[in-house]
Structure formats: structure tokens, C-alpha cells
Image: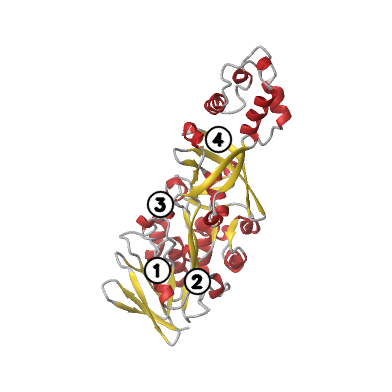
């Protein structure tokens, strides 16, 4: 087979995997607008790099929020186990945090170590990296890709072009959405972009008084159109609303619906206790204050605030009115919050929306409109929950896009 010239645009996780796979049989040029590879990769998992997840690959589909069926070929062509096997081959040390939803991290808790491995592997594979260059246009003739144009008006020709420029979240890393305009000019449909995995802005003022309080294993329930959404995870109250892993996941399921108005979310802070059990605890010692009886049930600062909010700080259990008891239990089991909006896409961990999947061949990642043009990663309209699933999408689609056919 004659060697082809493959151009990969964007040196994030999808682009790196595409380049490494394509370099097995081809000459590869990787174009990166920053002066380093994997700039956004550095930020994943709070800088610890949540590489993937150890769950069965079959379970990944339930964690994909948009267009999960499209990822069937990608996920099975290069699974999370294939990724870990690749890391084993490279003698790269990672750890599985089974008590943290099966997330996989670098052993050192440093994303830089993983990026260094990928950089060395790109060098070994003789991938030519062009830094500080941005692709501003595609060279297309008769619906066939011929190459790209860079911001210094340089034309680079190739047989295959793989676009892995990400979405619009974290624009400081280079994923500012500018490639979407280029793709639209060449006839590709770009589905509307939304912030995903993003904190939520809450209408209720009392939330501000809870600022800084973290809660574990909260159940979030919401209704979008007729669909019921239920998510469980940790959270933190902030000066504008709520954030934390559980909130971020919830945001990905309600972000589009927020365009049509506010959404009510119900929070259950004690999913393992019934209202009756909480009532018994509140009343357990009639001579003690309600707050005293509830000690240890939830974070003390949280309990203090909600009890104060109801004007029950000094109330003894024996004096507690049934109506006030019901209100207190409702605060714990069914706190109702009104989500006004999400924070902006700049604050989002990932972008929802992007190149329409119906215009991409799911078995190869090739454009159905332009021969030789491929896509991988967040530039495509696919996004998932937190936990390493979005990175696995990048690695899987990147590997598939970089394959020879």
C-alpha cells in the first residue's frame, strides 16, 4: 500500500490518537495552534487526568448524553480495555479508583505524565508536529479534500484530513469553535452548541447562605418535557447556585430545555432514609432542640442553615409543630430549586452540539459530504457524563478516524 499523507488538525486526545494510528502506515502532519500538545487534557480530572472508566464498555452507552448509537463502532473498535492495554504496553502506570465510580487516573495524579508519554510516542511514530499554527480553511475540489490552509496563508496538501479541534468550552486551550465556521462554509451542518457539564445558576436567594457547603450522594430529579431525569452525585452550594459532579451531570440533561425557561429541580439529601425515619430522629429526645436531635444526620453547617431558615434554631422537639416538621423534612428530602440557566460555555467542561452525526459515517468517521475528510472527538455532536467517558469518546473516535480503509 502506498503511503498517504494524513493531516490531523488539533493535538488534543482525539487528534493525538488519530495521528498515532495513522502513522502506522502513513506520513502524518499534526497541526496544533498552541505551543504544546494536550493543553485541555491537562485540565481533566482536576489536573489528575481521568483517562477513562473501568466499567464494561456496554455501560458506556448509558453514560453518553447525545447520540450514543453513533459511537457503537468507535467504542467497540477501540474500547477502554484496549486503551488500558495500550498503556500497559507503554509501561505507563495508572490506577483504577473503584470507590470513585471506577474512574481511571494516572498513578502520579499528574496529567503531565500522560501527555509526556503521548508526546514521546508521537516522536517515535515520526509524526511531524506544526505548533502555533491555526487552520483557517480547507482545500476541497469536487467534494474531495485536498488539504488545508493555515493562518499564515500556507497551503498544506494531503490525501486525508482529520478534524479534531474540539468544541467551544475552555477557549483558552484553543477550542474556541472557529473550525465550526470553516466546516459550515463547506456545507457541513453544525448543531447548536450548548454548555455541558457546567454549574447551574439558581433563582432562590437562600442558596447563597449555603455557599461553600458540600453534600454527598445527593439525588437530583427534574422533568424535561415528559421525560423524568434522575442523577445521583456530590455537589457544592456556590454564590450563584450549585456545582459539583452530580450537578455537572444533571446540567448535560437539562441544558437545551433551559432555552425554553426555568426548570425545577428536586434534591434529596438523604436518599437512604425515609421521611418517617427522619421524623423519628427529629422527635427522638423531646427535651433536646431539633438541631441537637439531628446532629450527625447531615453536615452540621447545612442543618444549622436550613433550621435557621425555618426559624427553628432554639425549638425543642416537644415544641415542634407538625407543619414545621414537614417543612424541615421537605427541605431535606425534597428541596425545590429553580434553575434559571447554566454558566456560560467558557465554564463548561465539554460542549454539547457540533458536527451533525448524520453527515458522518459512524463506521469510519469520514464525512458523507467530502471524501477524505474525517472527524473525531468533541467537534462531533456527542457528549457524555463525567467520569472519563468524554475522553474515551476522544480516544475511540480518534483511533477509528486514523485507521486505514
Separation of residues labelled 2 and 3 (CA atoms) = 23 Å
Q: Is residue 242 left or right of residue 278?
A: left
Separation of residues labelled 1 and 4 (CA atoms) = 39 Å
> Which residue is rendered at x = 47% and y = 35% of the image?
208
Separation of residues labelled 3 and 4 (CA atoms) = 27 Å
The percent coordinates of residue 20 (x first, y second) are: 44, 67
Separation of residues labelled 1 and 3 (CA atoms) = 22 Å
Q: Which circle's residue, 1 or 3, is located before the other in the chain?
A: 3
Name the residue beneath numbered marker 3.
Answer: 42
- Whether residues under marks 3 and 4 lie with C-beta atoms below 8 angstroms apart, the answer is no
5 lies above or below 95: below
Name the residue beneath numbered marker 1.
Answer: 179
Separation of residues labelled 1 and 2 (CA atoms) = 18 Å
Separation of residues labelled 4 and 2 (CA atoms) = 41 Å
* Residue at the extreme left: 152
The percent coordinates of residue 222 (x first, y second) are: 62, 48
Q: Which circle's residue, 1 or 2, is located before the other in the chain?
A: 1
Q: Secondary structure at mark 1?
A: helix
Name the residue beneath numbered marker 4.
Answer: 215
Q: Which circle's residue, 3 or 4, is located before the other in the chain?
A: 3
Q: Is residue 396 visible?
A: yes
- What is the crowding at mark 3: few (fewer than 14 residues within 10 Å), some, or many (at least 20)? many
> Which residue is rendered at x = 51% and y = 76% of the image?
366
Front-most of 276 and 121?
276
Name the residue beneath numbered marker 2.
Answer: 401
Amino acid at each position: 500500500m502506498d503511503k498517504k499523507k494524513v493531516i490531523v488538525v488539533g493535538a488534543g486526545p482525539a487528534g493525538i490518537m488519530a495521528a498515532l494510528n495513522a502513522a502506522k502506515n502513513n506520513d502524518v502532519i499534526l497541526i496544533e495552534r498552541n505551543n504544546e500538545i494536550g493543553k485541555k487534557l491537562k485540565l481533566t480530572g482536576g489536573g489528575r487526568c481521568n483517562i477513562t472508566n473501568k466499567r464494561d464498555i456496554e455501560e458506556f452507552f448509558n453514560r453518553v448524553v447525545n447520540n450514543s448509537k453513533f459511537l457503537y463502532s468507535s467504542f467497540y473498535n477501540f474500547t477502554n480495555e484496549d486503551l488500558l492495554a495500550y498503556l500497559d504496553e507503554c509501561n505507563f502506570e495508572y490506577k483504577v479508583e473503584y470507590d470513585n465510580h471506577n474512574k481511571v487516573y494516572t498513578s502520579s495524579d499528574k496529567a503531565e505524565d500522560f501527555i509526556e508519554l503521548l508526546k514521546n510516542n508521537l516522536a517515535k511514530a515520526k509524526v511531524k508536529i506544526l505548533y502555533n499554527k491555526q487552520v483557517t480553511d480547507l482545500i476541497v475540489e469536487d467534494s474531495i479534500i485536498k488539504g488545508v490552509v493555515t493562518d499564515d496563508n500556507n497551503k498544506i496538501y494531503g490525501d486525508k484530513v482529520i478534524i479534531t479541534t474540539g468544541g467551544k468550552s475552555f477557549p483558552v486551550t484553543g477550542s474556541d469553535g472557529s473550525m465550526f465556521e470553516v466546516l459550515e462554509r463547506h456545507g457541513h451542518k453544525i448543531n447548536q452548541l450548548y454548555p455541558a457539564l457546567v454549574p447551574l445558576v439558581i433563582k432562590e436567594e437562600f442558596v447563597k447562605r449555603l455557599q461553600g457547603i458540600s453534600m454527598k450522594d445527593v439525588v437530583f430529579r427534574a422533568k424535561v418535557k415528559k421525560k423524568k431525569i434522575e442523577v445521583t452525585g456530590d455537589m457544592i452550594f456556590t454564590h450563584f447556585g450549585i456545582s459539583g459532579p452530580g450537578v455537572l451531570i444533571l446540567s448535560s440533561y437539562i441544558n437545551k430545555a433551559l432555552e425554553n425557561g426555568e426548570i425545577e429541580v428536586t434534591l434529596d439529601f438523604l436518599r437512604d432514609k425515609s421521611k418517617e425515619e427522619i421524623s423519628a430522629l427529629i422527635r427522638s429526645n423531646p427535651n433536646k432542640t431539633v438541631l441537637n436531635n439531628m446532629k450527625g444526620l447531615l453536615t452540621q453547617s447545612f442543618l444549622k442553615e436550613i433550621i435557621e431558615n425555618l426559624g427553628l434554631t432554639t425549638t425543642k422537639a416537644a415544641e415542634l409543630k407538625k407543619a414545621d416538621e414537614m417543612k424541615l423534612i421537605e427541605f431535606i428530602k425534597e428541596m425545590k430549586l429553580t434553575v434559571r440557566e447554566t454558566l456560560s460555555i467558557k465554564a463548561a467542561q465539554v460542549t454539547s452540539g457540533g458536527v451533525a452525526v448524520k453527515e458522518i459515517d459512524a463506521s469510519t468517521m469520514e464525512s458523507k459530504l467530502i471524501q477524505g475528510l474525517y472527524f473525531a472527538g468533541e467537534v462531533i455532536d456527542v457528549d457524555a457524563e463525567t467520569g472519563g467517558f468524554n475522553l474515551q469518546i476522544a480516544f475511540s473516535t480518534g483511533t477509528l478516524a486514523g485507521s486505514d480503509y
